[in-house]
Image (cartoon, rainbow, N blue to C red):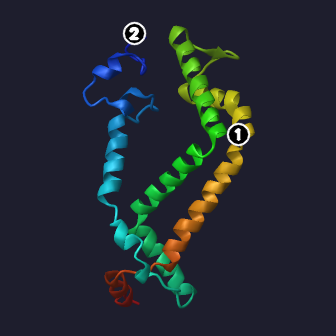
Amino acid sequence: MDGKASDPFSSEAEQLPGAGVVGRLWLPKGLSGNVIKDWVDRRRKSIRPWASFVDQRKFSKPRNFGELCQRVLRNMNTYHSNYTFIFLGLILYCIISSPMLLIALGVFAGAFYIIHLKTLEKKLVVFGRELTQGHQLGLAGGVSFPVFWLAGAGAAVFWLLGATLAVIGSHAAFRELESSDIDELLMEPV
């Protein structure tokens, strides 16, 4: 097997049809730029209009706990693509607003790239075992862990989870159901 053919960082990756910026980046096995593009396209097509998503007239306090649960379930199903983009936006905000976190991500990417280059030259063997790509990611994570710790990545993760839960949870709980959802709930068989 030729080492160049399996190198995702080679200049040959640029010659592949449809290999844009995402196609040139390293992606895990089985995950190509087209898969990511298809996933994002599906999310964009199923996104509900943002104007109706944030329409203040459609928000009210649920009458009881049962209605709250119904709203959360139905709104999560209805607005899942909107919620996905909100989550991705919060991740982006978290990364951009923390320069140390950007540095930590750079250290992680650099460590993985260096480990990847070493495995192209010669198979990387540690304690008599060859390192798979998963092991290489783990090794890069172990090398960059102190930088992530100094950057406060743990606090960023918990902030991200809390902000996501607060924003998405409050929207799902207080957004009234669409009229078609209410009719469906009323007509359920008992």
Residue at the spot of label 2:
2
Quadrant containing the C terminus is: bottom left
Task: Using the numbered discs, state the Cα–Cα distance from disc 1 to disc 2 in whole angstroms.
Answer: 40 Å
Element type at mark 2? loop
Left/right of residue 94 with respect to residue 147 in the rendered view: left
Vertical side of 34 occupied by 48: above or below:
below
Tell me which residue sits at (41%, 83%) in the image: 57
Please state, as top left, top right, bottom left or bottom right, where the N terminus lies in the image: top left
Q: Secondary structure at mark 1?
A: helix
How packed mark 2 is, by other alpha carbons closer than 10 Å (few <14, some 14-19, many 20 or more), is few
Marks 1/2 in contact by CB < 8 Å: the verdict is no
Percent across and percent down for residue 73 are 47, 73
Residue 42 coordinates in the image, percent (x, y): 32, 53
Of 169 and 58, nearer the camera is 58
Quadrant position of residue 45:
bottom left
Give the amino acid type for the residue marked by disc 2 in the picture. Answer: Asp
Q: Seen from this angle, which residue lies furthest left? A: 17
The amino acid sitting under disc 1 is Ala
| Between 75 and 129, the one nearer to me in the picture | 75
What residue lies at 40% left-to-right and 67% top-to-bottom? 79
Which residue in the structure is indicated by mark 1?
A: 151
The residue depicted at 70 percent of the width and 40 percent of the height is: 151
Q: Taking 153 as reference, is 187 above or below it?
A: below
Q: Which mark is residue 129?
A: none
Q: Earlier in the sequence, mark 1 or mark 2?
A: 2
For residue 182, what is the image quadrant?
Answer: bottom left
Q: How many C-alpha atoms fall within 10 Å of the one at disc 1: few (<14), some, or many (≥20)?
A: some
Q: Position of residue 111 (x, y in %)?
A: 61, 23
Q: Residue at x 57, y 61 (%)?
A: 164
